[in-house]
Image (cartoon, rainbow, N blue to C red):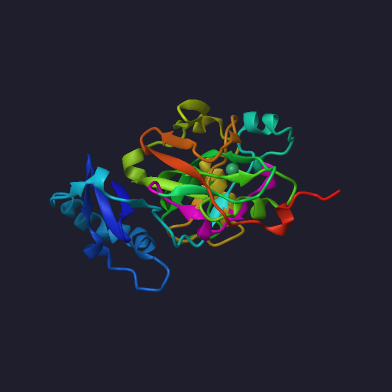
């Protein structure tokens, strides 16, 4: 099943080129509160699955005519593994890998979706890069999850871009700007996707292929990422794990179009725009 959030926060099931509104089965978000409807759907999926499947026969509307939002805006955390492909470690000149480094967090406020733009902060002289990553969506609360139990805790998968200002400041500060974590265009459930251990993911900037990788080359694999994170934090339904980027990271500039695609998930193309805000003092050019 493919699940999306669209327009003003409705929840939809995607069937071919249509989207079917199933918000009534999940319940609306409350105004002025975190948008937790998708978290609720994920937590209740075993109970809701048959109803959602039956609803797939309803008449839908054209997918092309809706605005696709980030699927889980109220994820309690985005857990991101750095340097999880050897070729990216080599291009960055780093010895350590994710299996020793662990992870960092991106704030939920950095999430955006397929119909949004990536907004660059107005800071000078800094390279801002794309990273092409698989998103693993947690389906069930868990702590100290054993490696062999990983499948019980995965709800689905999506595409994720980890956008970053290069530099020596704290990694989280460089990766936390609003819109620096596009996720989408939808979630594909684990049962529909099948085996995630050899998934090809690619990223283009203006039709130039920049990244082309396969999850078989992950240093710390998906069971390992779930094991490590859950031995430190309780994982919640709707939490997102960013699996790390392969080689080929590179700069994005205003006017660029960045497209990410994972096989058996889908693709999304996003525009890069120049914002006027974001002039954090830590990124101010050094004065002589
Ligand atoms: Mn990354």
Residue 87, position as x, y percentages in the image = 63, 28
Q: Which of these two is toward me, 239 or 231?
A: 239
What number of labels is visible?
0
Above or below for 68 versus 209: below
Specify whether residue 109 is painted magenta.
Answer: yes
Above or below for 201 versus 120: above
Q: Magenta segment, which residues?
A: 99-115
Residue found at x 56% / y 38%:
253
Quadrant of the image where one finds ligand 1: top right
Residue found at x 41% / y 57%:
72
- Residue furthest to the right: 288
The image quadrant that residue 217 belongs to is: top right
Lateral position of residue 100 relative to residue 200, left or right: right
Residue 201, position as x, y percentages in the image = 46, 32
Lateral position of residue 103 relative to residue 161, left or right: right
Specify whether residue 231 is painted magenta.
Answer: no
Residue 81, position as x, y percentages in the image = 60, 45
Residue 55, position as x, y percentages in the image = 17, 54
Q: Which of these two is toward me, 43 or 267?
A: 267
Lateral position of residue 25 relative to residue 129, left or right: left
């Amino acid at each position: 099943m493919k699940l999306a959030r669209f327009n003003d926060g409705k929840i939809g099931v995607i069937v071919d080129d249509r989207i079917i509104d199933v918000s009534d089965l999940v319940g609306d978000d409350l105004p002025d509160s975190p948008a937790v409807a998708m978290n609720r759907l994920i937590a209740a999926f075993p109970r809701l699955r048959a109803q959602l499947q039956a609803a797939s026969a309803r008449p839908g509307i054209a997918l092309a005519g809706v605005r696709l939002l980030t699927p889980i805006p109220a994820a309690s955390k985005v857990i991101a593994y750095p340097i999880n492909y050897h070729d990216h470690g080599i291009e960055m000149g780093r010895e350590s890998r994710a299996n020793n480094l662990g992870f960092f967090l991106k704030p939920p406020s950095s999430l955006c979706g397929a119909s949004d733009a990536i907004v660059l902060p107005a800071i000078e002289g800094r390279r801002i890069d794309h990273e092409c990553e698989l998103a693993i969506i947690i389906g069930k609360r868990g702590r100290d999850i054993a490696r062999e139990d990983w499948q019980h805790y995965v709800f689905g998968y999506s595409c994720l871009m980890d956008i970053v200002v290069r530099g020596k400041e704290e990694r989280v500060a460089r990766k936390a700007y609003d819109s620096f974590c596009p996720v989408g265009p939808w979630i594909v459930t684990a049962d529909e996707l099948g085996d995630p251990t050899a998934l090809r993911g690619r990223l283009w900037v203006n039709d130039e292929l920049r990244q082309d990788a396969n999850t078989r080359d992950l240093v710390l694999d998906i069971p390992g990422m779930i094991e490590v994170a859950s031995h430190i934090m309780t994982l919640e339904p709707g939490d997102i794990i960013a699996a790390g980027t392969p080689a080929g990271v590179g700069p994005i500039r205003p006017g660029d179009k960045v497209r990410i695609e994972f096989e058996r998930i889908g693709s999304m193309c996003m525009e890069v725009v120049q914002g006027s805000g974001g002039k954090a003092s830590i990124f101010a050019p050094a004065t002589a």
